[in-house]
Amino acid sequence: MGAAEELFYTEGIRAVGVERLLAASGVGRASFYRHFASKDDLVASMLREYDIRYREWLAERVTALGGDPLTVFDALAERSEWTGFRGCAFVNAMSEISDVDSEVHLIAAQHKNAVTNYIEELLIKAGYTDHSTLAAEFMLLIDGATATALRERNPGPALRAKTIAAHLLASHAPSPTQHPSP
Amino acid sequence: MGAAEELFYTEGIRAVGVERLLAASGVGRASFYRHFASKDDLVASMLREYDIRYREWLAERVTALGGDPLTVFDALAERSEWTGFRGCAFVNAMSEISDVDSEVHLIAAQHKNAVTNYIEELLIKAGYTDHSTLAAEFMLLIDGATATALRERNPGPALRAKTIAAHLLASHAPSPTQHPSP
DNA sequence: TCTTTGCGGTACCGATCGGTTCCATTTTTC
DNA sequence: GAAAAATGGAACCGATCGGTACCGCAAAGA
């Protein structure tokens, strides 16, 4: 399953056949189709699992970096330096699977909503009142930075997005430091 | 060739076989391979042609809307309402073709550079001094809005990006209206 | 008018696609 | 240790993949 995630992410969903998956994971063909109804089913399961892992990773990095909403962009910057970075798996999946009513699109939309909600929580904790609007704007910046990093291949886009986000916080927010201090 | 662009954009490059292209365009198989060395060659030619057409379209819309740098987001908003809108063809192509040294990635990078340069021109004409930085930030917003529109399917993301861009102009710029007035 | 050039159509190529079926073996469970 | 369950391997399925070769026809050039 980890093999599937790796292969699908680095080479694309359509580019990787079932044969490759079996060879990479050491799983037998029959065994595979006993666990998954189809390749599409595997893709959906993989994305659902990856959604959880991604958000766990994001939350871990953000808290490690201090918990400020802006640190999501630092996490993004780290991520864009990984070897084999290939952008957002969910955006890629949506781009590859054209059927908007497919499970892939549904899962991707749910993932983006979940991340948006997480960011909104960060904004609320930090004392911003426009948290809903800001969260949507943050998401747009995140997706923009990720898409840009796909071709620039360095942490530049994430940091660029961070400075834009800082502008937004500075103008939108009433007083981010009116929260309880130690 | 227009058929190829349509099919590749709406269904994805890997999802459309040569057979489909021939059937959709009425071109014979031999004829096709006399004009293009391979399917990849067709994809590259299509993207090169589309790059030009896209920029012509953008320039036309921007000038029609007044020529202000912010109008690129209005053009984007129009675009995201088209039936069959499927995001940025170049980002999609980069996401589908994993080989970063491929011609597809090269063409996509050149396209993004060309659009960035165009936006920088708009910023210069409007009197902004930070035109280079702002152009890169605009591009990030554009790609973010396009990626977001892929799942929201309405002009919302483009307008969201526009308000963010307006914030940037307001803070970055010295005085956008110090240019010659009629 | 005769020849050349380009065309669309078709048959065909090996390879791979996603998926099914069977089998022999290993692992689990009791 | 026997019975049951799950496994990996391989053969096989029809369909499609990208690509080649050859065909007969139609337009174009001389």
Image: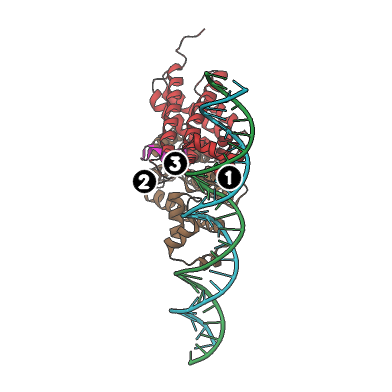
Chain colours: A red, B brown, C green, D cyan
Q: Earlier in the sequence, mark 3 or mark 1?
A: 1
Q: Subunit of mark 1? A: B
Q: What's the CA distance linking mark 3 and mark 2? A: 12 Å
Q: Is label 2 in a helix, a strand or a loop?
A: helix
Numbered badge on residue B98: 1
Q: Nearer the viewer, residue A43 or A12?
A: A43
Q: Nearer the viewer, residue A68 or C6?
A: C6
Whether B154 is among the magenta residues is: yes
Q: Nearer the viewer, residue B7 or B72?
A: B7
Q: Subunit of mark 3? A: B
Residue B16 against residue A140 in the figure, above or below = below
Q: Earlier in the sequence, mark 3 or mark 2?
A: 2
Mark 3 lies on residue: B146
Kindly check if marks 2 and 1 are in contact, taking CB atoms under 8 A apart as contact: no
Residue B105, x across and y down, in percent: 57, 48
Secondary structure mainly formed by the magenta segment: helix
Q: What's the CA distance linking mark 3 and mark 1? A: 20 Å
Residue A148 against residue B42 in the figure, above or below = above
Numbered badge on residue B78: 2
Q: Subunit of mark 2? A: B
Q: Are marks 3 and 2 on the same chain?
A: yes
Numbered badge on residue B89: none
Q: Which residues are magenta?
A: B142-156
Kindly check if marks 3 and 1 are in contact, taking CB atoms under 8 A apart as contact: no
* Residue B120 in view in this figure: no
Amino acid residing under circle 3: Thr
